[in-house]
């Protein structure tokens, strides 16, 4: 991370006040030092990838993840997504299965990149944006949560008729940041193998999302 946060200009415009806070300066200093001394995922250039691929004005859907994948080559700055050529993690396999069952379309289980979703307006935000290799949730409580809470609230306040997909208790804990009177909130269990059968499978979030977007004259997502 350079001294100044390199982030997509629309997002810079929306978040610049938060970037000036002492909390955010402390966070950037912490993350910068972590990159110097440890193996951190994703690569620094991908830290704010979700923001670059989905500019503020383009957001139609928000899918919240917890923190990046902590295995070699997996994290790429988009929640649940892995680069092409990387085996699909179990949660992403279950997301693909639900899409197939919900929409009746065939997914390529060899391609785990969700960048095409992001380009269509699906903001794939991890609540915590960095992680120490092989150490899940290692950057919890360092300041990312306050930053992404601000991001979620800004999206909710300044947009209308978006779809928020909250999978699992961690994502659902962010519900209070979202104005339910003007957005659709879809909640379910997490797609992890530990919980997918407790309500993720059969949730039909992808068809519900597209029906809502269509009803508000927005282009549907090609899942």
Image (tube, grey):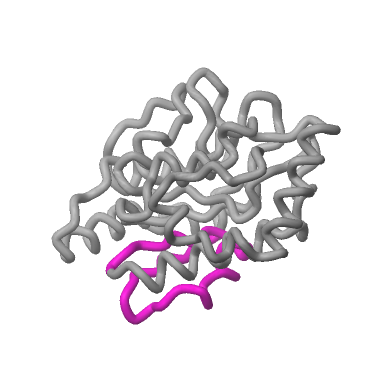
Across and down, in percent, residue 51 comes to: 46, 46
Above or below, 37 against 222 in this view is above
Q: Is residue 70 or residue 155 the one in the foreground? A: 155
Q: Is residue 95 or residue 86 the one in the foreground? A: 86
Magenta segment: does it hold 153? Answer: no
Horizontal side of residue 187 vs 118, given as left or right? right
Residue furthest to the bottom in view is 181
Q: Could you tell me which residue is drawn at 64 percent across and 30 percent down? A: 43
Across and down, in percent, residue 21 comes to: 65, 65
Q: Mark yes or no: residue 160 visible.
A: yes
Q: Could you tell me which residue is drawn at 79 percent across and 48 percent down? A: 30
Q: Could you tell me which residue is drawn at 32 percent across and 64 percent down? A: 162
Q: Which residues are magenta?
A: 161-189
Across and down, in percent, residue 24 comes to: 67, 59
Horizontal side of residue 7 vs 35, given as left or right? left
- Residue 158: which quarter of the image? bottom left
Position of the C terminus, as image quadrant, is top left
Residue furthest to the right in view is 37
Across and down, in percent, residue 173 comes to: 60, 70
Residue furthest to the top in view is 85
Position of the N terminus, as image quadrant, is top right
Horizontal side of residue 220 vs 116, given as left or right? left
Q: Mark yes or no: residue 80 visible.
A: no
Q: Is residue 205 or residue 170 the one in the foreground? A: 170
Magenta segment: does it hold 173? Answer: yes
Above or below, 212 against 138 in this view is below
């Amino acid at each position: 991370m350079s001294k100044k946060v390199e982030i997509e200009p629309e997002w810079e415009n929306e978040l610049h006040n938060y970037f000036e806070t002492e909390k955010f300066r402390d966070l950037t200093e912490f993350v910068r030092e972590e990159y110097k001394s440890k193996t951190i995922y994703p690569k620094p250039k991908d830290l704010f990838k979700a923001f670059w691929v989905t500019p503020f004005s383009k957001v139609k859907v928000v899918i919240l993840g917890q923190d990046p994948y902590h295995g070699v080559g997996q994290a790429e700055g988009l929640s649940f997504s892995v680069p092409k050529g990387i085996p699909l993690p179990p949660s992403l396999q279950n997301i693909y299965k639900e899409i197939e069952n919900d929409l009746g379309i065939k997914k390529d289980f060899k391609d785990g990149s969700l960048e095409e979703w992001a380009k269509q307006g699906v903001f794939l935000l991890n609540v915590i944006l960095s992680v120490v290799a092989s150490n899940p949730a290692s950057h919890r409580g360092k300041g990312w949560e306050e930053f992404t809470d601000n991001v979620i609230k800004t999206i909710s306040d300044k947009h209308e008729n978006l779809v928020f997909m909250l999978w699992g208790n961690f994502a659902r804990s962010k519900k209070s940041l979202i104005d339910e009177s003007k957005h659709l909130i879809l909640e379910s269990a997490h797609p992890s193998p530990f919980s997918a059968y407790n309500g993720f499978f059969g949730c039909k979030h992808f068809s519900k999302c597209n029906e809502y977007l269509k009803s508000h004259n927005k282009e549907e997502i090609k899942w």
